């Protein structure tokens, strides 16, 4: 499955709250979510390789899985 990270999500990675969360962490987390996501849904409790907790808001579109935003803990 193709994972598409929005510019908004990439920008949020530069914020202090998302410090130490990498794009590869987001890709792996998005691939872990089973099934089809028809509308934007928040998924909680992912852990980056650095140990940082984060949530994702994802939605499936015809081109793949769209990562709308990242919420660091």
Image (spheres, rainbow, N blue to C red):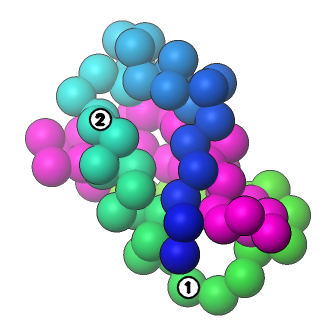
Instruction: Look at mark 2 in the image and give the residue it sits on.
Output: 21
Q: Main secondary structure of the magenta part?
A: strand
Asked if disc 1 and disc 2 are in contact, CB closer than 8 Å, the reply is no
Q: Which mark is residue 34?
A: 1
In the displayed structure, would residue 30 be above or below residue 34?
Answer: above
Q: For the residue carrying disc 2, how many other residues have a C-alpha within 10 Å: few (<14), some (14-19), or many (20+)? A: many
Q: Is residue 23 visible?
A: yes
Gap in Å between the C-alphas at discs 1 and 2?
Answer: 22 Å
Residue located 45% across and 71% down the image:
31
Q: Quadrant of the C terminus?
A: top left
Secondary structure under tag 2 reads loop
Q: Is residue 5 left or right of residue 21?
A: right
Residue 12: x percent and y percent?
51, 21
Residue 68 lies in the magenta-colored region: yes
Q: Is residue 42 visible?
A: no
Foreground residue among 19 and 36: 36
Answer whether residue 62 is magenta in the image. Answer: yes
Label 1's element?
Answer: loop
- Residue 40's image quarter? bottom right
Which stretch did the figure color magenta? Answer: 47-73
């Amino acid at each position: 499955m193709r994972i598409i990270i929005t510019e908004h999500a990439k920008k949020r990675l530069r914020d202090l709250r998302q410090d130490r969360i990498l794009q590869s962490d987001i890709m792996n987390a998005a691939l872990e979510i089973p099934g089809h996501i028809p509308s934007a849904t928040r998924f909680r409790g992912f852990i980056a390789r650095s140990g940082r907790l984060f949530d994702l808001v994802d939605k499936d579109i015809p081109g793949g899985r769209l990562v709308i935003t990242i919420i660091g803990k």
